[in-house]
Image (cartoon, grey):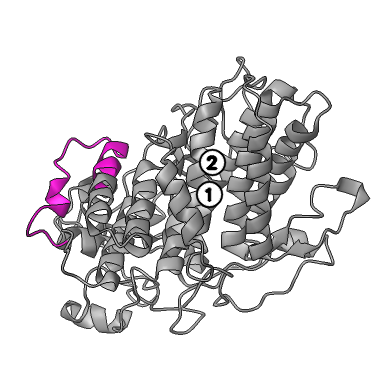
Amino acid sequence: MLVVGLVSCNDYLDVNKDPNNPETTTNELLIPSGQAYIAAVVGGDLHNTACFFSQYLEQAPEANQYNTLCEYRFSTDLFNRSYSNIYAGALKDLETVRFQSDKNPSDYYVATVLRAYILQIVVDYLDKAPYTEALQGNKNPMPKWDNGQDIYAGILKELDDAEAKLDGKSLISADVMLGKDVSKWVKFANALRLKIYMRASNVQDNSAKIKALIDENNFFTGDVKFDMFSNEANKRNPWYETNFVKLANNHVGSYPIISYLKETEDPRLSILFKKATGSADYVGMLPGSKTRLTANKNSAYSFPNASATVPVYFYTQSELQLFLSEAYLRFYNNDTKAKEAYEVAIRANFTTRGMSDDPSAIYGVGKLAAWNSGASIDGKLKLIGTQKWVALCMVNNAEAWSEIRRMGYPGLSTSTASDINSNPSVYKPGELICPWVNSLGNKLVKILYYPSVATNLNNNTPDRTDLTEKVWWEKN
């Protein structure tokens, strides 16, 4: 059972107690409770799922916990715990804040921002979700599943409506993320709007809305994160708690990310991974290769570095700056601004990782990841997308998977895992690799099954049998 502990008014909230039968929580703790539930989902199960889909990590050869994830043969149970924690946990708490009789406009607003944040993630994983009829309890135990495009539009309107009601009053509820500073929540909400507009920008003309947000330039500084962990039982980072305390030695580095970091001489490599004990080098495992390279041992590969106290990042400055870089390129035709934001993003990612290295080692003149003003638009977008893949690695894996699907970068190698194993020179670093053993054939997973916990209880839950279906915002 994954547990997240947070300190607020000297109380601890266990966010993975049965969300269908929650203990009583005072109104002052409902926003921190919602924040903790979201952190447990984004920094726990989704972080783990997406580390395989984004090809950051693979199942270690001498362990078996995640064999189904690396080969895309997981079941409809995969999203169950996340779904329960989102709807019966986070959204239930936030809805209580939004509609309690003595609600404060600032509390209502912060709860709405958090609600928008997690609902967008549900859409990005499932495409459809209960929305307009959700959270009605016994009044409507079988809510309809709304289209993702409608949910995106709905949460944007909710943000606008809630912001219009702000009256300068302070938060009543505790707030363990942004210190009860409503102005910081407005800046976070603006960045969330930008992400939502950019996520849909391949299928919708959101250019005017994107430019309006950028021209206003009222975005957060630093990172937005849930940073309440300590190296004590039930108070650790959720991914660490599950995979380094309760389980062990299940993850090794994936071939694509390690190959690219080595190719670009990126100092983030040593922050992310340990050297393989068998070779004293950084070595990644080919996706889906466990049952094909059965002679290999754990010692052949690099294990990830991890920390019990690392925050769960909701939105980083690096991610924001890479959205800005893309927008300056696509909607302003401003190469100078795009380059500036791109380089700021890499510097910000070094800061997030606590690195003192010079980030120009990545984007300096002559470096493989240097900005090339003479390149095509597609070439520059590829650079942005690939560096976003690196920047989000083990920072926000869920966001990385969504951006890979939206931007199309890193792209998929034309060489098979078998070919690469026989002749590594056929592989170009900076590309994903189709898993060697893959229940989808020669395709990458694009979406999750609708969770069985919903299917079993709600007759309106749609059917899904094809994991290569596209989320509504995916163009290609």
User: Are there few (<14), some (14-19), or many (20+) residues within 10 Å of tag 2?
Assistant: many
Q: Please report the residue visible at 14 percent of the width from the left and 41 percent of the height from the top.
A: 358
Q: Is 257 in front, or is 357?
A: 357
Q: Which residues are magenta?
A: 346-368
The circle on residue 193 is 1
Can you name the residue that lies furthest to the left here? 366
Residue 25: x, y in percent? 74, 25
Q: Secondary structure at mark 1?
A: helix
Q: Please report the residue visible at 85 percent of the width from the left and 47 percent of the height from the top.
A: 136
Residue 428: x, y in percent? 21, 75
Amino acid type of the residue tagged 1 in the rendering: Arg
Q: Secondary structure at mark 2?
A: helix
Can you name the residue that lies furthest to the right here? 139
Can you name the residue that lies furthest to the top here? 10
Q: Are marks 1 and 2 in contact (CB under 8 Å)?
A: yes
* Rendering quarter of residue 53: bottom left
Lateral position of residue 14 relative to residue 224, left or right: right
Q: Which residue is mark 2?
A: 189
- Figure check: 334 above or below 465: above
Quadrant (top left/top right/bottom left/bottom right) for the N terminus: top right
